[in-house]
Amino acid sequence: MPAQIATATPVAHAALLGLGVYRPRRVVPNAEIVDRIDSSDEWIRTRSGIEARHWADADETIVSMSTAAARDALEAAGVTAQQIDAVVLATSSQMVLGPSAGAVVATELGMHDTAAFDVSAGCAGFCYALANAANLVRAGQARHVLVIGVERLSDLLDQDDRTCAFIFADGAGAVVVGAAEEEGIGPVAWGSDGSQTAAIKQDKDFQQYFAEVAEAEATGGHAERPYIRMNGAAVFRWAVTFLEKACRDALDQAGVTVEDLDAFVPHQANGRITDALLRALHMPESIAVARDIAQTGNTSAASIPMAMEQLLRSGESKPGDTALLLGFGAGLAYAGQVVRLPAIS
Ligand code: UT7
């Protein structure tokens, strides 16, 4: 008889225990970027809802921004770094392929021998990471998990690209996930569609770029580095037609109706996408709606924790409120879940 393999001891419920964010020091108003993309403050505000964004300085790295956000999340949760059993970090703009940023952040926070890994799911990254963290806790594989969403998208921006230069931005958000007496993180509704890869993508891979550099060196030409590119209209169309179903799926799985919600925290992609989802879902006007995009821009995997923090900091929402989160973007990938909002420090 082969030896029986034991399973970890599961716990019934997981919840968001604390939240922290890092907003880069440098604020970039629309006025600073409009000339290079032949745009206007008014066009950007009305078409996207963005008034300003934060772009990181050299010392505000993926690791340093994550570490700062994580410290605040730990403090808000009343949990020490030593109590964290796993770090799950979502990003699409870490320029180092190895080691994982999560492992470096864990060490920066003073953790030893802690499981750590990165998740790449574009702007859905935070909700993907959160789903995995909640399942690790419920399965009894980790007592506490630190989930981080972080981006330095300014590194991937072609400053002359009219579609992307005004949208994408930098920042970090982190939450601590742990066991709870009642459920605080509903089942995830998620998916992806690789057939729509062209809608948002890095325009060339590094092998192509190196080949172009070699050719440029041989011919005296110029090699353009890889940038993020987006077919804005295609993504917009997908978001306003497909994502209503994702929201309804997350609500149904959690056994919650739109009327039960206190807050809606969609990925901060475009204020008009948020408005379209509010209409499609017939959300009551009493629901607090995250509008962090106005001052923060689109920070991809960081946008949902940053937007949650803005709602809590402003007093529009309070810890314990029931919120629907929805991440969506490159992949095209999406993930959403109903949560109870955490404490902030
Ligand atoms: O986070 C990942 C997920 N990303 C998203 O969800 C982003 C989704 N897409 C969007 O948010 C929108 O598509 C954008 C904000 C990127 C663009 O807004 P749009 O309303 O879809 O603009 P468009 O590309 O359809 O262009 C409309 C017009 C065009 O002019 P004509 O042909 O109507 O004369 C464009 O040339 O606006 C023009 N235009 C601009 N004008 C000033 C396009 N970009 C700009 C610009 N400034 N930056």
Image (cartoon, helix red, strand yellow):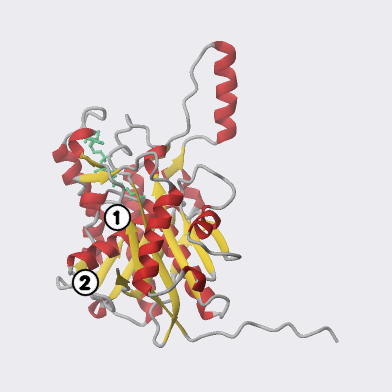
Task: Give the residue furthest to the right.
Answer: 1
- Which element is circle 1 on? loop
Q: Nearer the viewer, residue 192 or 79?
A: 79
Q: Which residue is mark 1?
A: 268
Mark-to-mark CA distance, 1 and 2 = 17 Å
Above or below, 250 against 116 in this view is: below
Residue, far top: 220
x and y percentages locating residue 264 in the rendered image: 26, 68
Q: Amino acid at mark 2?
A: Ser
Is any part of residue 288 visible from this angle?
yes
Quadrant of the snapshot with the N terminus: bottom right
**Picture quadrant where residue 26 is located:** top left
Residue occupying image coordinates x 60% and y 21%: 214
The location of residue 24, given as percent across then percent down, is 31, 48
**At 15% across and 73% down in the image, what residue appears?**
286
Left or right: where does residue 271 sit relative to residue 190?
left
- Quadrant location, the C terminus: bottom left
Disc 2 residue lies near ligand 1 with CB under 8 A: no
Q: Where is residue 96, by image quadrant? A: top right
